[in-house]
Amino acid sequence: MNRQQRVRIATFDLDGTLVSRHVWLGLAKYHFRTKKNRFSVFWYIFSNMALTPFWKMGFMSQEKYYESWGKGIASMMKGIDKDKAKEIFQWLSDEYLLPSKNEKIIRRLKEHQREGFLTILISGSFQALLKTIANRLNIKIFIGTELEIKKDKFTGKIIPPLCFGKKKLEKLKNFFSREKLKVNFAESFAYSDSFFDLPMLELVGHPIVVEPDKKLLTVASKRGWRVI
């Protein structure tokens, strides 16, 4: 790649955008299928459900509530070693997530790749899982949330920050800075279903919302953004 030339990018969210299924539910299904780590699933669900009244009553912002769910997914990996994690991530990718891929968005991904765009998979999901999915879809760049590992086992915690909201945009910009990439944002695209990806969508000249949540649909309608 010519680093002096301004590149056009196309960023893709994962859950709800490239695929219709969600990582946390897939991981829960895997643990129940293998009859292991089921306590971690119950703890993840009930500990976050306990926060629901605080969110509903306005004591907790929606963003913080969603962040709690996003960070907590790591708890379902607690105590698992790296070799076993590879098996889990391959199952999540090949047996659970990719079979639910959004064919319209996959076609647009391939079109961007043929047209020379730098395609980027960026999600709050685990970095190692995104690597597996990116390999399947021929995506060279993937940016996600790092999991903490000690003594070759996952601790059940993330290495902050969670790749979510404004932090997702920060991670993307840090990648550009680190790689010394000059980006033609005006001609670039971003795809997402979530209102919390608004900072990333606003970065590019062609924001595309995919089966958006209500808040994002409202913004897209007002601004005339394309909705798929």
Image: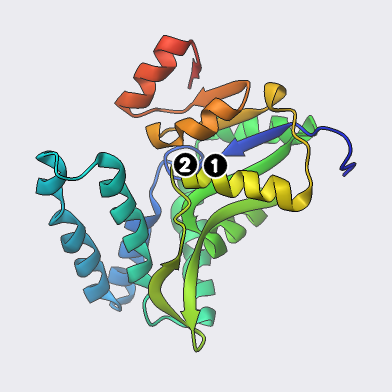
Query: Badge 2: few (under 14), some or many (20 or more) residues near its Cα, within 10 Å?
Result: some
Which quarter of the figure has residue 76?
bottom left
Colouring mode (rainbow / by chain / secondary structure / one colour):
rainbow
Q: What is the x, y in percent for residue 195? A: 39, 31
Identify the secondary structure beneath mark 2.
helix
Specify whether 186 is left or right of 200: right
Q: Which residue is mark 2?
A: 166
Judge whether 149 appears above or below 25 on screen.
below
Residue shown at 54% from the left, 42% from the top? 169
Proximity of marks 1 and 2: CB atoms separated by less than 8 Å: yes
Which x, y percent locates residue 128?
56, 65
Residue 213 image point, x, y percent: 34, 29
**x then y, percent, for residue 114:** 78, 33
Mark 1 is surrounded, within 10 Å at the Cα level, by few (under 14), some (14 to 19) or many (20 or more) other residues, namely some
Q: Amino acid at mark 1?
A: Leu
Residue for point 48% across, 64% down: 91
Q: Is residue 132 or residue 200 the one in the foreground?
A: 200
Q: Which residue is mark 1?
A: 169
